[in-house]
Amino acid sequence: MARRGRPRKAGAREANGRLQRNGTVAQLREAERAARLKETSVVLAQPHRRAAIDPAHPWAGTAVGRLLLPRLAAAPGETQMLFEAADAWRRMVRRLWRAKGVVDVNSALEHDPADTPGRPADLSDAEIDERSRALAARVERLRRFMVEASTPGFAALHDAALFDRDVTADAEGETVKALERLAVELRLLARAERAA
């Protein structure tokens, strides 16, 4: 009786039943390394990574990261704090938008589970409304502090953090000034919440 399906290829087999690949282990590893290098070169050639100081750095994929990468070598701790402050601002504003029912195209394309506030089953509508109002007050307070530090810097930071728009060279200083003010205010808010 004949077997059904495609005829089996002749040749030596690996332990898992697959045909053995041609070549030595060293040749196979070299081919895999070349494939990884090609893939990396494609990633590094992307337009938004070309101008970055270190295009392989994970921050090079975001507008805020590209703004802060030149500062990273001189002050790594402070720069990390600024990047985290911008990320916290992005998450807060997107959470507020979702609470208000605003459709955010950027967050729909890349869903971050940490951004999703969720709706615990034991919370009433009044408690959820209260939390939304508290979040809106916090976002407005931080916005006022950043605008006080630099209005054009706040506008550029807002666009960079929320819409991934690159900061122009003439707005970099003002944007960093607004970002530094945001980081300070976030630290003060965290201290106040721990004390309460």
Image (cartoon, helix red, strand yellow):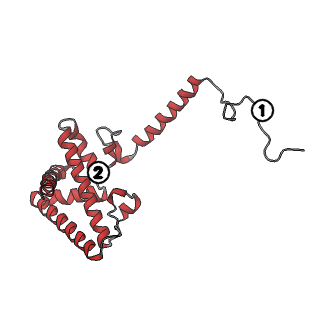
Camera-nearest residue between 157 and 195: 195
Pointer 2 local density, CA inside 10 Å: few below 14, some 14–19, many at least 20: many
In the displayed structure, 30 sits above or below 178; it is above
Q: Quadrant of residue 109?
A: bottom left
Across and down, in percent, residue 168 comes to 23, 52
Q: What is the count of numbered marks?
A: 2
In the displayed structure, 85 sits above or below 140; it is above
**Tag 2 secondary structure:** helix
Q: Quadrant of the N terminus?
A: top right
Residue 167 visible, this angle? no
**Tag 1 secondary structure:** loop
Q: Residue at x 82, y 47 (%)?
A: 4
Among the two numbered marks 2 and 1 on one chain, the one whose residue lies closer to the N terminus: 1
The disc label shown at residue 10, or none: 1
The type of residue carrying mark 2 is Ala
Q: Which residue is mark 2?
A: 63
The type of residue carrying mark 1 is Ala
